Structure formats: C-alpha cells, structure tokens
Amino acid sequence: MAEPHAVVVGGGVGGLAAALALHRIGWAVTVCERAPAVDPVDVGLTLAPNALRALDTLDVGRDVRKGSVFQGLVSIRHRDGRWIVRTSEADARQRFGDAVCVLRYAELAGILLGRLPAGAVRTATRVTAVNPGDTRRPAQVVTDAGELTADLVVVADGARSTIRPELFLEHPGAVYAGFTCWRAIAPWSADVVPEFGETWGQGGVAGVLPLSGGEVYCYATVNSPAGAFAADEKAELVRHLEGWPAPLPELVAAARPESVVRMDIWHIDTPLPAYHKGRVALLGDAAHAMTPNLGQGACQAVEDAVVLAHHVSGSMAYVPTALQSYTDARLPRTSGMVQRSAQLAEAVQSESPFLTGVRDTLAGVVGRLAPHLLAHYIRPVSDWHPPVDA
C-alpha cells in the first residue's frame, strides 16, 4: 500500500512540526513554502512546559533544551524597576516538571527541518487554492508550480492565511489587536547581568530574556495603527525605550539594525466554527492566532501538530472523521487561550494611569500573598500533556 500523502502549506514552526509528526507515523509529506528559502526571521522564542512535552513526543525535546536558556514562568516589574511578581526556574520545574526555555526561532525551525526527509520542503512554492476533498475524494492543492493530490492538507500559513478565507467564507478572519511589537537580538556582557523578565508600562510592555552565546532577546510593544512602520525601526525602538529601566535601552542600542524586527499583532478574535473542512486541517496561527502576551503562539502550534498526527493515524478513508476529532480536541483549548491572551493584552496595553496602577497592585498582591492563585492561572496553559499514544 502506498504511503498516505500530506501537503503542508507553510514552512514555519507549526508547519514543520506537523510535517515531522506525520512523517513519524508513516506519512509522506510535502511542505510548500512560498519564500525562496526556509530562512526564519532571527527573533527569540519562549517554549513553556506544555510545548516541551509536545516536542518530546517528536523526539526533538532534548535537542531543543540543549540550545536553550531556562527561566521561570512569570517575571514582571514596574516601569520604575520594582518587581511586581517573579517566579523561579526551580518553582516552574517543581510545579510543572519543566521551566520555560528561551531560544532562537530559527534554531527550533532548524531542528525540525533537520529531522524531515530530504526534498520534503519545496521552497518558492506558493499555494493558490485548495479543494478540500471528502471521504471519497482526495484533496487537491493548486500551487504556482503545479497541482498536488493529498490525503490530508495542513494549512499552517499564519494569521493572515490566504487559504482560510476560502474554507470559511463567512468568518471575519484575523483582526488587528491594536498594537505592534518590536523584537531584537542584542549582545550582552557577562560583566553586566540584566534582570531578565518583562516590564509593564502605560500603553505597552518591554522585556529582555537570555539566549545562549552571549546574546539576549529583547522585545517591546506599543499601541499603534496597523501598518505604521518606520524607515529606521531600530532608531524608532531606541526612541520608544527612552526612560525604561536599564539595561533594556542600552541593550537595544547595541543591537544590529538588521536584527530589529517589527510586526503588527493580529489575532482571530472570533473562533472558527471548526479547524477542519473535508481533508483540510488548520493549525497554529492559521487556526487560532493570538496576541503574544501568554507566550503561547508557537507552543499551541506544536501542540496542534502532535494532536493532529494522533488523530489521523488510522484509515485514510476516514481522514475527515478523524479531523472532526482533531477539532473537538483543539478548538475549546485554543479558543480559550486566544481570549485569555486578548484580555491580558488589553490590561497591559492600557494607557490609563489609574487602570495600570490597579493592574500592577493586583498582580503584585497575587504574586506575593497568593502564589497558588498565580499557579492556578498558569496551570491550564502549562499543564497540558500530549495524547498517550502520540
């Protein structure tokens, strides 16, 4: 019997994780990436314990941990530098069996790509249409390099997916969250150890997290109209961080200009009715794009990949039925995550001095006096486990 064939639309972390998960259960995979090369943007990435468990089922968790630096689950301070709440790596391991690891997005993508068969990824291949098929007919994927037949199509082409609107004509799609985010990689000296974590201000946040190799990952958000990009994004970020606690402004000033990346934040505020149609499954940001406030975008995409492979491991004739099970497993969890992240974004992007004061006070009380409440808030996010036979 011929191997079942899956076509994955999009070569980001979610698409590569799905391709690897399917490859490991005996599927032939073709990843269609529209860029001329799989060359992920050089930004930092955090992976919580739930994502690390998913990566363990793909047999890449050890490699991911090797190249990572570990942190506690929550470290937040005031704009004036005082800590609001801070958790340790040891506390995270005690409560959830792992800590948060920080690494480059490109490093994770490279690990996943390295486990795929040669030729599985087709770059400079843009998917223009998908016919979802049904129990009797395979799916058809139209690309600018020709047409592909597939037992399964995985749509992983991001928040602004071009395929999702074809499948769900009446859905409003992704909406702008109202703010933009800068990300940068910067060098730092071991003589000056930054206090790693996130700082909450009025109308945005800023953070610095460690990377291996004597570098740090910096980020900052600000309320802004969609598409309001600057000619010199590094200069704009340096200007925005004037007056923020040291050493964040100094670190950003030392970053290479080309390492500063700006990205408007879009999310799928209205849940999709399903994460599948026919033989097509949606995954990651294409299914449930969320704001970055929970640090769960990539984590949920990797979860999706593992759960999808678990549900389609049976008969090819029943892929559409298996995909209904995938929707049932993923839609409630990820929809709740999208809403929780949006609520947190609304709080941290507030420009009201009164509301930000109340926000910081409540967060500090919870962190100091009721750590079990903080753990209760985090547990639904981080205490996820893959299907037992994934």
Image: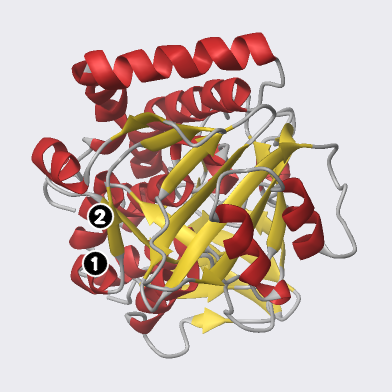
Residue occupying image coordinates x 72% and y 81%: 145
Other residues around mark 2 within 10 Å, as few (<14) / some (14–19) / many (≥20): many
Three-letter code for the amino acid on which mark 1 is drawn: Arg
**136, above or below 258, in the image:** above
What residue sits right under mark 1 in the picture? 65
Residue occupying image coordinates x 52% and y 24%: 344
Q: How many marks?
A: 2
**274, above or below 152, in the image:** above
Three-letter code for the amino acid on which mark 2 is drawn: Leu
- In the image, taking residue 296 as reference, residue 42 lies left or right, namely right
What residue sits right under mark 2 in the picture? 52
The image position of residue 166, as x and y in percent, is: 72, 45
- For the N terminus, the quadrant is bottom left
State the residue lying farthest toward the front.
191
Other residues around mark 1 within 10 Å, as few (<14) / some (14–19) / many (≥20): some
Element under label 2? helix
Q: Nearer the viewer, mark 2 or mark 1?
A: 1
- In the image, taking residue 236 as reference, residue 325 lies left or right, namely left
Q: Quadrant of residue 295?
A: top left
The image position of residue 12, as x and y in percent, is: 53, 65
Residue occupying image coordinates x 40% and y 42%: 323
The image position of residue 276, as x and y in percent, is: 50, 41
Q: Tell me whether the residue at label 2 lies in contact with that at label 1, contact meaning CB atoms closer than 8 angstroms.
A: yes
From the viewer's side, name the closer residue of 163 and 242: 242
Q: Quadrant of residue 156?
A: bottom right
From the viewer's side, name the closer residue of 329 and 206: 206
